[in-house]
Image (cartoon, rainbow, N blue to C red):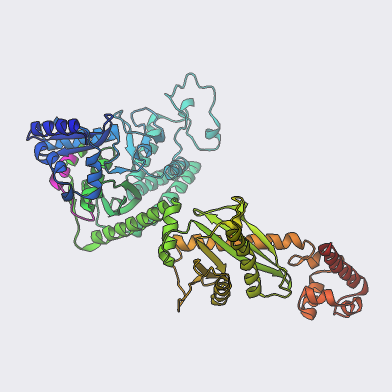
């Protein structure tokens, strides 16, 4: 902090009043870094400018960037809380705990202030007389909810006021029974608003009351011989009943409440919210929060309550929490003002409420773990660091080379090398090997030849001093990955040792059980399936396998897998008989036409076609 800036801040610190209010920290360009509230501005703000060793590391980073501060006094702490919430929404400071992307969270809006209400997605709550439900973090989920509601309760889809005098004819939605068409006068405002009431009951979780309403209307329609209407009401009743049964998975004592549990990590936190209406869990949502200053769970949960309920569509009279929050009395008072009635905050100790809080906390921890894994997966350096830690390497393996070999029915051994740099495949550096010294299937010999040829050029260049930046063989890998187990690893180690390269890090990854074999390790290493290190190594191994198989098929286009079936006269029955008799295509290639004809189900014409097909393939490869 510059001397003049330091003097400016010290002067302002001396002038801070001992009153409730909101303070703003600014950077050198006047941008808002942080917004906070305090019961005593003087006491609270001065704590940031104490000795740095008394501050948390992340808070110290914030303080180092402060060039100016401002404040606004309020009459009460509740007013300070409201002002803080408004300023955070306006400025979205970098160092405030915030809902990730909450500015995009949608609401479900029902325009009950209109004579013929409609239902749609809204992006903010306004004081316009409409009913709002949400916010929902999943935009796809809320649109699916609207589709369900409009299928059950056919409200109008069109925007704007309904004018029966200007409408020419009903739209398509009327003809497919997805709208009651108030625009044509086919339904009265009273009848239409019965549907709206039913939707509100559905969204409020009062399905039992809604079912009673639908049952009564269905009976009345049947009694008055309106069978088509009764059938429609019956379908609505069954759909609502099915949904209600799904929501009875977890039941608490009657009443409306929100259950909120929070799990905190180093950089993120996750809040899980269960909405309980009429004693049943009717909604489950999770919200991710940033945690830039490393706050404790209780503080993050308190901030989440302020951020969420400052724009929530509805506030229940009871909120159950996973831990006690700071300033709970202040929060309860603020919620009372917003709700228009008493709101209690509590941490249940026993019974079904405690079980639901525990379930919510389990979900919050799971979502947080997934978010941490996803954020690390998006950061290649974090993944490479995981590889280094898992394998005991001194540094992150920025360049990983993977090796694999292949043969086709005992013929034509080939090999391949793939390269990953910074966790990303580098196809321009891939190389293929036509193995010269391996006449029969021998993975060990193939691996020995590949590594010898790959590093021979590197060693020769080191002696002559000549180098080419375009030759991938002249780059030194930070890690060599072999497809195989302990045997392949031993061969690779012996080959590198003979070349004087025994210091190169190397590991073998075996298929099936996905075990890692390390040099000098008595037992293989088993990483968790969700391990980012294992997933990267699997990608390298699988890419080497894909590349070598592609090369094998390119070299031998006439004999791939079951391509015996492509030969005239050879069907599935003869293919099986040939393989059972000879064991491999290599043995068939050595057979005469007469020997091929002698196989069960074969005839002379099919044997000749097979013979010439196999030997033409040999001729093409020799050419």
Does 621 sit above or below residue 517? above
Q: Is residue 484 magenta?
A: no
- Residue 180: x and y in percent read 47, 33
**What are the residue bounds of the magenta stretch?**
320-334
Q: Considering depth in this image, is 561 or 600 the residue closer to the camera? A: 561
- Residue 346: x and y in percent read 18, 53
Does 110 sit above or below residue 603? above
Q: Is residue 164 left or right of residue 132?
A: right
Q: Quadrant of the N terminus?
A: top left
Name the outermost residue toward the top.
165
Residue at figure coordinates x 37%, y 43% from the top left? 136
Name the outermost residue toward the front.
464
- Residue 81: x and y in percent read 18, 37
Q: Quadrant of the C terminus?
A: bottom right
State which quadrant residue 2 falls in.
top left
Q: Is residue 333 left or right of residue 615?
A: left
Asked if residue 106 shows in the view, the reply is no
Q: Considering depth in this image, is 481 or 24 the residue closer to the camera? A: 481
State which quadrant residue 99 falls in.
top left
Q: Considering depth in this image, is 260 or 175 the residue closer to the camera? A: 260
- Residue 251: x and y in percent read 30, 58
Name the outermost residue toward the left.
18
Residue at figure coordinates x 46%, y 52% from the top left? 380
Asked if residue 465 shows in the view, the reply is yes
């Amino acid at each position: 902090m510059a001397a003049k800036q330091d003097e400016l801040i010290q002067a302002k610190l001396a002038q801070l009043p001992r009153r409730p209010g909101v303070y703003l920290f600014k950077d050198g360009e006047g941008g808002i870094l942080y917004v906070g509230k305090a019961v005593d501005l003087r006491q609270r703000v001065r704590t940031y400018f104490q000795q740095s060793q008394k501050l948390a590391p992340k808070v110290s980073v914030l303080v180092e960037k402060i060039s100016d501060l401002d404040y606004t006094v309020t009459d009460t702490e509740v007013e300070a809380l409201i002002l803080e919430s408004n300023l955070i929404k306006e400025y979205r400071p970098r160092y405030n705990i915030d809902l990730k992307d909450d500015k995009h969270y949608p609401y479900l809006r029902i325009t009950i202030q209109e004579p013929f209400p409609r239902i749609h997605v809204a992006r903010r709550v306004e004081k316009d007389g409409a009913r709002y439900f949400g916010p929902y973090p999943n935009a796809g989920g809320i649109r699916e909810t609207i589709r369900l509601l409009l299928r059950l309760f056919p409200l109008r889809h069109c925007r704007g006021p309904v004018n029966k005098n200007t409408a020419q004819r009903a739209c398509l939605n009327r003809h497919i029974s997805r709208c009651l068409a108030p625009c044509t006068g086919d339904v009265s405002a009273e009848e239409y608003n019965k549907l709206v009431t039913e939707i509100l009951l559905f969204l409020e979780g009062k399905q039992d009351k809604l079912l009673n309403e639908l049952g009564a209307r269905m009976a009345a329609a049947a009694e008055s011989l309106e069978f088509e209407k009764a059938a429609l009401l019956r379908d609505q009743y069954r759909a609502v009943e099915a949904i209600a049964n799904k929501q009875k998975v977890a039941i608490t004592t009657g009443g409306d409440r929100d259950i909120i549990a929070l799990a905190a990590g180093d950089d993120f936190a996750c809040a899980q919210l269960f909405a309980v209406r009429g004693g049943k869990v009717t909604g489950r949502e999770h919200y991710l929060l940033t945690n830039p200053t490393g706050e404790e769970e209780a503080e993050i949960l308190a901030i989440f309550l302020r951020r969420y309920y400052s724009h929530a569509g509805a506030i229940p009279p009871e909120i159950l929490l996973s831990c006690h929050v700071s300033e709970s009395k202040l929060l309860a008072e603020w919620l009372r003002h917003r709700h228009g009635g008493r709101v209690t905050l509590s941490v249940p100790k026993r019974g079904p409420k405690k079980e639901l809080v525990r379930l919510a906390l389990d979900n919050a921890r799971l979502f947080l773990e997934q978010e941490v894994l996803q954020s690390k997966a998006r950061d290649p350096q974090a993944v490479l660091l995981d590889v280094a830690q898992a394998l005991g390497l001194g540094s992150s393996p920025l360049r990983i080379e993977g090796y694999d070999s292949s043969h086709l029915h005992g013929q034509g051994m080939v090999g391949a090398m793939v390269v990953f740099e910074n966790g990303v495949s580098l196809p321009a550096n891939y190389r293929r090997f036509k193995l010269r010294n391996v006449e029969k299937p021998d993975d060990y010999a193939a691996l020995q030849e590949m590594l010898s040829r790959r590093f021979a050029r590197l060693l020769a260049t080191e002696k002559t001093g000549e180098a080419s930046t375009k030759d991938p063989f002249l780059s030194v890998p930070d890690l060599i990955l072999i497809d195989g187990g302990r045997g392949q690893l031993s061969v690779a180690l012996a080959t590198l040792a003979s070349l004087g390269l025994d210091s190169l890090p190397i590991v073998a990854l075996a298929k099936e059980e996905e075990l890692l074999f390390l040099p000098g390790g008595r037992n293989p290493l088993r990483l968790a399936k969700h391990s980012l290190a294992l997933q990267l190594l699997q990608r390298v191994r699988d890419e080497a396998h894909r590349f070598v198989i592609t090369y094998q098929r390119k070299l031998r286009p006439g004999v791939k897998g079951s391509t015996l079936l492509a030969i005239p006269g050879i069907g599935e029955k003869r293919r099986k008989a040939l393989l059972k008799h000879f064991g491999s295509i290599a043995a068939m290639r050595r057979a005469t036409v007469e020997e091929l004809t002698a196989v069960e189900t074969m005839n002379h014409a099919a044997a000749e076609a097979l013979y010439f097909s196999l030997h033409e393939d040999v001729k093409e490869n020799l050419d």
